[in-house]
Image: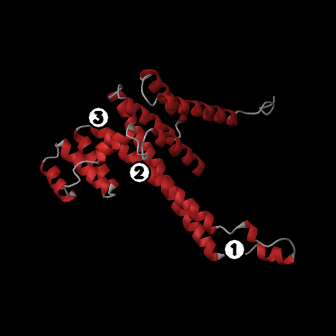
């Protein structure tokens, strides 16, 4: 599973400009969403939104401030509250989807860290005893400290993986809405493909990349989208081949 996460984030996040310091692509989207109102406190922004819940600018500023403080769940709740009254707000939906993708990225890092902890907790094979009576006796010994550490790492891994999966599914659901509300938004379509890929909905991701390439042939990210589409087609073909029933193993009369 970790290899899978590495592929998804290494391939799609980088070429979209997220976290790469790129001056184009989604890097600009992130800086726009999370870069404003840095001089205004969260408390002041919360008061402003409480006084006028329909003030979209104040809502965006508050969510961005909460995001900067690491209060992602509160940022999501802020957007969700506004969307309850304005369910078709493309801007708020786009911002919320990106927050979910940020959550997914954080969870993926936590998955990686948990796996490193698990590998350090596991006893190295080269230090285990060899054959013979002594080896057989010591080979069955389980270090309780290592076992406890490994169990804790496994629990952390499972929790982080659940957060990663949930955040990607939430983002994907929003991008499905955006694909209908803003069909001409190239960045939203590309992020839809990315979210589908991260959620392991490979056919949906493939269709979204293909639609992006067809609709926006002159976009600067088309070349990278073609590469991702090619890789996805390979993965889909491999999955199809792995579930095929071998010949001669079907039911006999």
Q: Is residue 125 visible?
A: yes
The residue that disc 2 covers is: 103
- Is residue 1 something that shows in the picture? no
Tell me which residue sits at (24%, 48%) in the image: 36
Q: How far apart are marks 1 and 2 (CA)?
A: 36 Å
Which x, y percent locates residue 232? 57, 33
Earlier sequence position, callout 2 versus callout 3? 3
Mark earlier in primary sequence (1, 2): 2
Determine whether 100 is above or below 222 in the image.
below
In this view, the residue in front, 55 or 77, is 55
Q: From the image, tell me which residue sits under label 3.
A: 90
Residue at the location (82% across, 74% down)?
A: 135
User: Of 149 and 117, which appears nearest the observer?
Assistant: 117
Circle 1 SS class: loop
Count of marks overlaid on the render:
3
Q: How far apart are marks 2 and 3 (CA)?
A: 20 Å
């Amino acid at each position: 599973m970790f290899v899978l996460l590495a592929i998804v984030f290494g391939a799609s996040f980088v070429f979209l400009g997220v976290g790469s310091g790129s001056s184009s692509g989604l890097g600009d989207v992130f800086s726009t969403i999370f870069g404003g109102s840095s001089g205004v406190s969260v408390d002041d922004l919360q008061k402003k939104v409480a006084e006028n819940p329909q003030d979209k600018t104040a809502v965006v500023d508050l969510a961005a401030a909460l995001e900067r403080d690491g209060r992602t769940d509160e940022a999501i709740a802020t957007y969700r509250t506004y969307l309850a009254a304005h369910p078709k707000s493309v801007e708020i939906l786009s911002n919320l989807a990106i927050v979910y993708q940020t959550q997914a990225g954080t969870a993926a890092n936590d998955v990686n860290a948990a796996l490193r902890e698990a590998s350090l907790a596991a006893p190295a094979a080269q230090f285990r005893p060899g054959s013979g009576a002594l080896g057989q006796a010591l080979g069955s010994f389980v270090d309780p400290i290592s076992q406890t550490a490994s169990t804790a790492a496994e629990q952390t891994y499972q929790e982080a993986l659940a957060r990663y999966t949930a955040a990607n599914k939430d983002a994907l659901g929003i991008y499905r809405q955006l694909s209908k509300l803003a069909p001409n938004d190239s960045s939203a379509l590309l992020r839809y493909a990315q979210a589908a890929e991260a959620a392991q909905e490979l056919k949906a991701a493939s269709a979204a990349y293909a639609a992006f390439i067809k609709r926006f042939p002159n976009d600067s990210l088309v070349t990278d989208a073609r590469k991702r589409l090619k890789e996805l087609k390979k993965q889909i073909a491999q999955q199809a081949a792995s579930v095929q029933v071998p010949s001669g193993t079907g039911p006999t009369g």
